[in-house]
């Protein structure tokens, strides 16, 4: 039984309208139905803000993501023991290693279809099998990244992307139409779970999908075992669903919220929260963006959002930073956003603005830096004491402030972005490094971290809640550290691994 | 999305805009664009919220933001009808605020030019002078955002739209493309009024590097591709 609060969209529903898709974010958890509040520090009062953004659809955020599919490197799993901690952050090692996860990385890449080229990155982890498809087509910004990286002495690598570069499992290959980022793929070439795992599960006839069902409570019995969930169906009637085991995969924002809402006499601080860690250590992945104009037209709107990446900055410890990251060049914005984001020092209206728009739009490239964010205990998701969403459930309250070490690294990444753009031949650049308020986050990580010690973590290495033997939590919230910017493949590999282990437990009769 | 997302940029650029515009129902807004484009092509267009005098003011304002200087601008895109429809549907709540802004605009005009109360009666240079003096106000920010939204939104609920400049848009493809006489699809990059066409399936890479390195030759942009696509997505009723 698959319960999903989002809608089941089909290809006929997809369109390329930028206003509704990008600016209004129509596929996301937008207000007024979904309500969230945000504050910077635990002593402040939270104000309404659409802060944790995820796709509210069958298929989740892989429905409309840019499809970057980086693996973690082996060192991401034990950064704490390799590099030590950093003040103000609750760094810890993962309870699993890269080698334990590797078979599942490979399984995901082949199950959903990932395009890439293994073996060209000298620092990647061991790989048991090549990608099922060659990399996506080289794009204009990708070429410029190659030029810039070469000049600096770095190397641009073919980007691993969850986009089919060849026909794959009955789906079409990418047509290079360019509407990936923010948009759902009407060709089915983007390997989102709406086109891959969900249809496959339904075709097995052993899975039932109930969409537009909002779970409000996970129920438990006197023995402290999960007995099922209560949800609001499409017509907002309350329904009780019994279950032998429950998997929470509601993302790093909604999963802790659901646990905190599921209080009972036995679990007074929220379900599976004896450690007090539910909702703590929220991380988003840092990102920096620098814009540039080039002399010639770049045509970045054609093709995948990203075709080349630079990972020479993956480990910045020797540069005095904690963590690291990578870069890509991409088509900055579709037309409306582009018009709203013209270089800030130029004209913003009138004939001069129109000319700028005509000249800059197709000559612009955005350099994205994708980086670490440190786990900080006070950066957290909990329940707002007053605000309620349209189901009458307590709203998510986010408390978030960037760690100083992260801000220092954003500055470093931003400066390197400008360097890369200039090396690639940019005639002018703009932008600024991020400040200490991220505004919103789309990678929702760390809020039910995994670990071996029940006092400091929520789930064990098999994603089973320490406090509840038949409750599993499998999404970005299990992350112990944030990796380097692209978490989706790791979330999916963890899910494959958790499913594998849970089915073995079920066969042994351990799930009750 | 699962990829870094420029919320920071959104917050920075959208800043002063009433949230209501952002929350417009997609269907209502798509219809508003279709309505705008249709009305702009009519001899006697209809208005719901604005009086003809107010509409002239809004149009004068919008066409200074995107002027019709050699290529079509906000006037030809019918932005005023888009705003009119918006204020009568999804942004109803903003109508009083918007009307207040218009009234204030008259005072700004008479403050600058004695005896004048209408922006639309001024010369373009005089209009620019007035707008420059209110550039930092929320009303200007809202007008700019509404104008750009009207310009760059796609009429998602119509099949073929004839624009007032005689060109047309085929919405059955659900992409911002135009069919050109040479049979090639060219992506409409910057709205109908700022047409920048790209017929070459090559990317910048092919100009900079050996063409063999650029796999853009495999791009399926051509008549056959378009026909397949049209078949795959039959027009909506």
Image (cartoon, coloured by chain):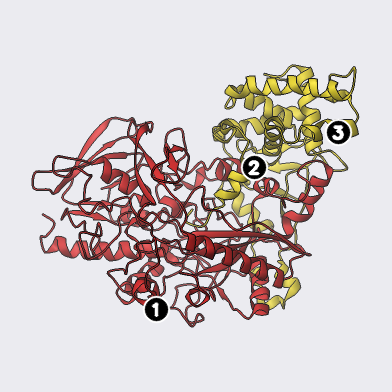
Badge 2: residue crowd in 10 Å (few <14, some 14–19, many ≥20): many
Image check: A326 left or right of A331?
left
Which residue is denoted by mark 3 in the rendering?
B129
Q: Quadrant of residue A470?
A: bottom left
Asked if residue B161 shows in the view, the reply is yes
| Of B234 and A63, the residue lying toward us | A63
Which residue is denoted by mark 2 in the rendering?
B171
Rendered location of residue A246, percent (x, y): 22, 50
| Of A483 and A403, the residue lying toward us | A403
Please name the color used to draw chain B. yellow
Q: Nearer the viewer, mark 1 or mark 2?
A: 1
Badge 3: residue crowd in 10 Å (few <14, some 14–19, many ≥20): some
The subunit carrying tag 2 is B
Q: CA distance from mark 3 to mark 1?
A: 66 Å
* Circle 3/circle 1 CB separation < 8 Å: no
Q: Which mark is residue A129?
A: 1
Q: Nearer the viewer, mark 2 or mark 3?
A: 3
Q: Which element type, helix, strand or loop, lies under badge 3?
A: helix
Q: Which element type, helix, strand or loop, lies under badge 1?
A: loop
* Chain represented in red: A
Q: Which element type, helix, strand or loop, lies under badge 2?
A: helix
Badge 1: residue crowd in 10 Å (few <14, some 14–19, many ≥20): some
| Of B46 and B16, the residue lying toward us | B16
Q: Nearer the viewer, mark 3 or mark 1?
A: 3
Residue displayed at 84% across by 38% down: B68
Residue displayed at 32% across by 52% down: A249
């Amino acid at each position: 039984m698959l319960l999903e609060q989002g809608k089941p969209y089909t290809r006929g529903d997809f369109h390329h309208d930028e206003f509704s898709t990008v600016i209004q974010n129509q596929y996301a958890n937008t207000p007024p139905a979904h309500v969230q509040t945000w504050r910077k520090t635990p002593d402040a009062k939270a104000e309404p803000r659409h802060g944790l953004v995820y796709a509210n659809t069958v298929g989740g955020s892989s429905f409309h993501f840019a499809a970057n599919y980086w693996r973690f490197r082996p060192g991401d799993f034990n950064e704490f023991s390799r590099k030590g901690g950093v003040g103000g952050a609750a760094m810890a090692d993962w309870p699993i290693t890269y080698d334990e996860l590797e078979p599942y990385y490979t399984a995901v890449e082949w199950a959903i279809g990932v395009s890439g080229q293994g073996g060209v990155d000298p620092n990647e982890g061991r790989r048991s099998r090549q990608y099922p498809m060659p990399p996506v087509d080289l794009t204009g910004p990708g070429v410029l990244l190659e030029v810039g990286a070469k000049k600096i002495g770095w190397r641009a690598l073919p980007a691993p992307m969850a986009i089919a570069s060849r026909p794959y499992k009955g789906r079409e290959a990418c047509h290079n139409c360019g509407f990936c980022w923010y948009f759902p793929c009407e060709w089915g070439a983007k390997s989102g779970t709406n086109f891959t795992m969900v249809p496959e599960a339904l075709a097995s006839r052993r899975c039932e999908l109930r969409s537009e069902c909002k779970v409000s409570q996970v129920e438990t019995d006197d023995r402290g075992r999960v007995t099922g969930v209560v949800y609001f169906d499409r017509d907002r009637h309350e329904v009780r669903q019994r279950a032998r085991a429950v998997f929470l995969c509601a993302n790093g924002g909604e999963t802790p919220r659901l646990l905190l809402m599921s209080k009972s006499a036995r679990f007074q601080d929220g379900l599976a929260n004896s450690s007090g860690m539910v909702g703590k250590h929220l991380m988003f992945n840092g990102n920096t963006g620098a814009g540039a104009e080039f002399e010639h037209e770049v045509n970045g709107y054609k093709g995948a959002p990203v075709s080349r990446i630079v990972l020479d900055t993956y480990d910045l410890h020797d540069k005095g930073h904690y963590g690291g990251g990578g870069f890509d060049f991409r088509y900055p914005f579709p037309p409306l956003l582009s018009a709203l984001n013209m270089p800030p020092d130029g004209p913003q209206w009138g004939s001069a603005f129109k000319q700028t728009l005509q000249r800059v739009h197709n000559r612009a490239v955005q350099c994205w830096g994708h980086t670490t964010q440190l786990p900080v205990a006070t950066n957290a998701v909990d329940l707002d004491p007053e605000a309620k969403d349209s189901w009458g459930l307590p709203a998510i309250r986010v408390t978030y402030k960037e760690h100083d070490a992260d801000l220092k690294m954003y500055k470093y990444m931003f400066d390197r972005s400008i360097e890369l753009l200039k090396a690639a031949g940019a005639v002018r650049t703009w932008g600024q490094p991020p400040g200490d308020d991220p505004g919103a986050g789309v990678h929702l990580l760390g809020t039910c971290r995994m670990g071996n010690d029940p006092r400091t973590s929520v789930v064990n290495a098999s994603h089973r809640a320490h406090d509840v033997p038949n409750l599993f939590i499998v999404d970005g919230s299990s992350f112990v550290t944030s990796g380097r910017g692209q978490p989706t493949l790791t979330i999916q590999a963890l899910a494959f691994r958790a499913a594998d282990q849970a089915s073995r437990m079920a066969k042994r009769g351990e799930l009750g | 999305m699962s990829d870094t997302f420029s919320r920071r940029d959104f917050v920075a650029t959208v800043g002063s805009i009433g949230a209501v515009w952002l929350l417009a129902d997609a269907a209502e807004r798509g219809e508003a664009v279709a309505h705008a484009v249709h009305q702009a092509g009519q001899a006697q267009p209809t208005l719901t919220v604005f009086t003809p005098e107010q509409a002239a003011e809004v149009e004068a304002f919008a066409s200074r933001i995107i002027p019709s200087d050699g290529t079509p601008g906000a006037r030809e895109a019918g932005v005023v009808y888009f705003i009119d429809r918006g204020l009568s549907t999804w942004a109803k709540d903003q109508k009083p605020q918007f009307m207040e802004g218009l009234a204030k605009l008259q005072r700004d005009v008479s403050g600058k030019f004695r005896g004048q109360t209408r922006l639309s009666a001024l010369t373009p240079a005089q209009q620019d002078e007035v707008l420059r003096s209110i550039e930092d106000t929320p009303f200007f920010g809202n007008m700019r955002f509404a104008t750009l939204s009207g310009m760059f939104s796609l009429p998602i609920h119509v099949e073929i739209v004839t624009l007032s400049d005689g060109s047309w848009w085929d919405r059955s493809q659900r992409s911002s493309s135009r069919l050109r006489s040479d049979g090639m699809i060219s992506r409409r990059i910057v709205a109908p009024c700022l047409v920048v066409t790209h017929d070459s399936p090559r990317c910048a890479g092919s100009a900079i590097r050996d063409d063999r390195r650029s796999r853009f030759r495999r791009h399926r942009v051509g008549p056959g591709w378009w026909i397949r696509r049209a078949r795959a997505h039959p027009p909506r009723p």
